[in-house]
Image: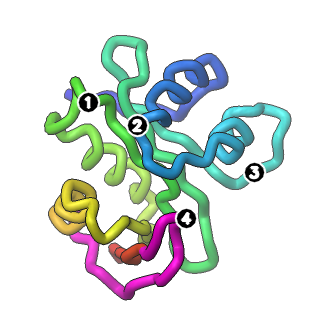
């Protein structure tokens, strides 16, 4: 069974290591979310093995959706359903989810499509190195 829980400040070193697997991480957003004194609506959920985070989802609420800003699982723990469990936990309140994905990131596109996300549109020049595809799940 995959355990999902809210991140705590003590998780930061593990989450920073996990974040290194992302092509365009947002270290400031992650740090601000874990700072108990910061006023941010963003949240981080973690997937743990024992007590160690091996995956996380960083979400930012919007007007009509929750934006999945970062989702990563350590390579040794992929294909165990952890990313799907993180997405499900993020949407427990019934909110819709959106995410942007690089068009050539086949693994991410396959995951989101398997989780019921549908491609809405292409966003030119979204990432530093090019476009993104916007996916949404209601």
Report the residue at 75% width, 51% height from top. 40
- The alpha-carbon separation of the residues under discs 1 and 3 comes to 29 Å
- The alpha-carbon separation of the residues under discs 3 and 2 comes to 24 Å
- The alpha-carbon separation of the residues under discs 4 and 1 comes to 24 Å
Which of the image's four quarters has the C terminus?
Answer: bottom left
Q: Residues within 10 Å of mark 1 (few under 14, many from 20)?
A: few
- Picture quadrant of residue 7: top right
Q: Nearer the viewer, mark 1 or mark 3?
A: 1
Q: Nearer the viewer, mark 4 or mark 1?
A: 4
Which of the image's four quarters has the N terminus?
Answer: top left
Give the farthest residue toward the front: 129
Query: Quick one: 131 or 85, which is closer to the camera?
Result: 131
Q: Nearer the viewer, mark 3 or mark 2?
A: 2
| Magenta stretch in the rendered image | 115-131
In this rendering, is residue 14 above or below 82? above
> Which mark sits nearer the N-terminus, 3 or 2?
2
- For mark 1, give the secondary structure: helix
| Tag 3–tag 2 contact (CB < 8 Å) | no
Q: Residues within 10 Å of mark 3 (few under 14, many from 20)?
A: few
| Tag 2–tag 1 contact (CB < 8 Å) | yes
Query: Quick one: 25 or 69, which is closer to the camera?
Result: 25
Q: Which residue is mark 1?
A: 75
Q: Nearer the viewer, mark 4 or mark 2?
A: 4
- For mark 3, give the secondary structure: loop
Q: Which residue is mark 4?
A: 128
> Which mark sits nearer the N-terminus, 2 or 1?
2
Q: Which residue is mark 2?
A: 21
């Amino acid at each position: 069974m995959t355990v999902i829980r809210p991140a705590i400040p003590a998780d930061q070193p593990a989450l920073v290591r996990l974040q290194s697997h992302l092509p365009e991480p947002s270290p400031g957003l992650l740090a601000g979310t874990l700072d108990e004194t910061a006023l941010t609506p963003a949240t981080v959920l973690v997937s743990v093995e024992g007590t160690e985070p091996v995956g996380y989802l960083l979400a930012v609420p919007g007007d009509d959706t929750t934006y999945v800003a970062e989702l990563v699982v350590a390579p040794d723990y992929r294909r165990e359903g952890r990313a799907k469990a993180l997405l499900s936990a993020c949407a427990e309140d019934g909110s819709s989810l959106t995410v942007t994905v690089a068009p050539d990131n086949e693994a991410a596109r396959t995951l989101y499509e398997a989780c019921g996300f549908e491609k809405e549109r292409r966003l030119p020049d979204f990432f530093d190195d090019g476009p993104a595809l916007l996916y949404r799940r209601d």
